[in-house]
Image: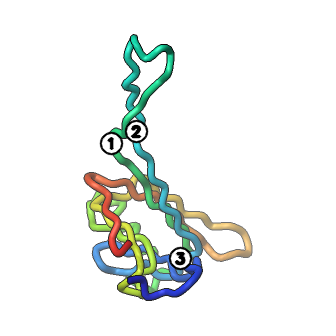
Amino acid sequence: MAKTIGKLPGNLIMVSADGDQIACTTNATFNGTIERIETTCKDDDGAKTYEPGSMDGTIEVQGIAIVNTVTNFALIAEKFFAKEEGTWQYGSLDNTDDPYIQFDGFISDLTWEGPLNNPSTWSITVVPTGRIYLFNT
């Protein structure tokens, strides 16, 4: 049973890498897709039929760059440049009974911005290397 009652506030949605919750994030998004395989036969009288195929997805995270906290920019930059695979979690991670998504994967994209008169920000895209799991539904 979910610990959070009612609407799940977006502020509760966090991302972790190998158990380390990424600090000072400003947005997080999970995108999931399932391949659609056409199974139409010649005798289906023109009606197309489909079945689900393989699943894929991404976790996209944005944040403010903080260099004196190991669970922020240092963590993601190290994982990116080392091409390091890890276990990624997305969801209401502070409430252990709430739903969350988990997969093993790596950072495929890293953007680091330095705008004038604003905090430096980063964004990453994490892609799975295997199955995507959903826990606590």
CA separation in Å, label 3 and label 2: 30 Å
Q: Amino acid at mark 1?
A: Ser
Q: Position of residue 100 (x, y in %)?
A: 39, 72
**What's the coloring here?**
rainbow
Residue 59, placed above or below residue 20: above
SS at mark 3 in the image: strand
Number of dots carrying numbers: 3
Residue denoted by label 1: 54
CA separation in Å, label 1 and label 3: 30 Å
Q: Position of residue 125 (x, y in %)?
A: 46, 57
Residue found at x 40% / y 74%: 99
Question: Which numbered tag is attached to residue 25?
Answer: 3
Label 3 with label 2: CB-CB less than 8 Å: no
Question: Which numbered tag is attached to residue 19?
Answer: none
- Callout 3: 10 Å neighbours few (<14), some, many (20+)? many
> Quick one: 68 or 129, which is closer to the camera?
129
Residue found at x 41% / y 80%: 98
Question: Which numbered tag is attached to residue 35?
Answer: 2
- Callout 2: 10 Å neighbours few (<14), some, many (20+)? few
Q: Earlier in the sequence, mark 1 or mark 3?
A: 3
SS at mark 2 in the image: strand
Q: Position of residue 28 (x, y in %)?
A: 53, 68
User: Is residue 114 left or right of 30 when viewed as pictured?
Assistant: right
Residue 111, placed above or below residue 75: above
SS at mark 1 in the image: strand
> Quick one: 30 or 82, which is closer to the camera?
30
Q: Amino acid at mark 3?
A: Thr
Q: Amino acid at mark 2?
A: Glu
Q: Position of residue 87 (x, y in %)?
A: 28, 67
Residue 2, placed above or below residue 28: below
